[in-house]
Amino acid sequence: MIEGSEAREHLAMVDRIVERTSSRLNVGAEYFVVWGIASATMSLSWQLISDHRVPFNAIWIAWGAALLAVAFSIWRGRSAREERLTFLDREFLTVLKVAMGVTFFVFAIELFGANLFGSIGLGAIWSFAASIVLFYIALHGNRRARGGGILILLSLVVANIRPDYAGYALSAGMLVGYAGFGVVEMLAASRAVD
């Protein structure tokens, strides 16, 4: 049986550990920057193509951005295994894999003949998945993630209200809400090191 003073010491130790737990990402902010830019590029490309402002073969810019983001994620995922990850880092990477894995599945079935969402709809699905990742991080006390998630949800609202500008709205949401969150997290990490 544990005595009262010993129990208080254990609780005090747990309190000190919890106080030191950071709500900032130490690993992974760069994923937000890369995928935010890639997603913004894809939505913007589809919008410009559907507005007949650029030729259809400009879609290769979007595919190039997506392939670069995938290559970066594979490379960065391998190098992250060697780094010391915080609880939030591990949780972020887990929820990112799940959310983006499901989104990739939807994207793949759409490419191979399903016509559920269309090109702009796929951008909305990416935005929806990105907001889930940000709000999950926000649940761990990260206010910057909450702000980014809110910006992405607002871009979905604008895209719904103004479907003729949906690609522009989704692109802005991913660029400001998702990539912007990554940049802010990287700046916060560099200030914490100084």
Image (cartoon, helix red, strand yellow):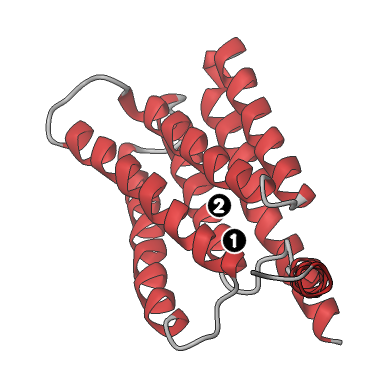
Q: How many marks?
A: 2
Q: Is residue 120 left or right of residue 132?
A: left
Residue drawn at x 68%, y 52% is 140
Residue closest to the eye, 167 or 87: 87
Picture quadrant where residue 42 is located: top left
User: Percent from the top left, x then y, of residue 129?
Assistant: 47, 39
For label 1, the SS is helix
Residue closest to the eye, 81 or 126: 81
Residue type at numbered disc 2: Gly
Eyeballing the image, is 101 above or below 116? Answer: below
Badge number at residue 106: none
User: Percent from the top left, x then y, of residue 55?
Assistant: 36, 38
Eyeballing the image, is 102 above or below 30? Answer: above
Badge number at residue 33: 1
Eyeballing the image, is 124 above or below 181? Answer: above
Q: Is residue 122 left or right of residue 116?
A: right
Q: Are marks 1 and 2 in contact (CB under 8 Å)?
A: yes
Residue 18 visible in the displayed image:
yes
| Residue neighbourhood size for the residue with mark 1, other residues' Cα within 10 Å, grouped as few (<14), some (14–19), many (≥20) | many
Badge number at residue 36: 2
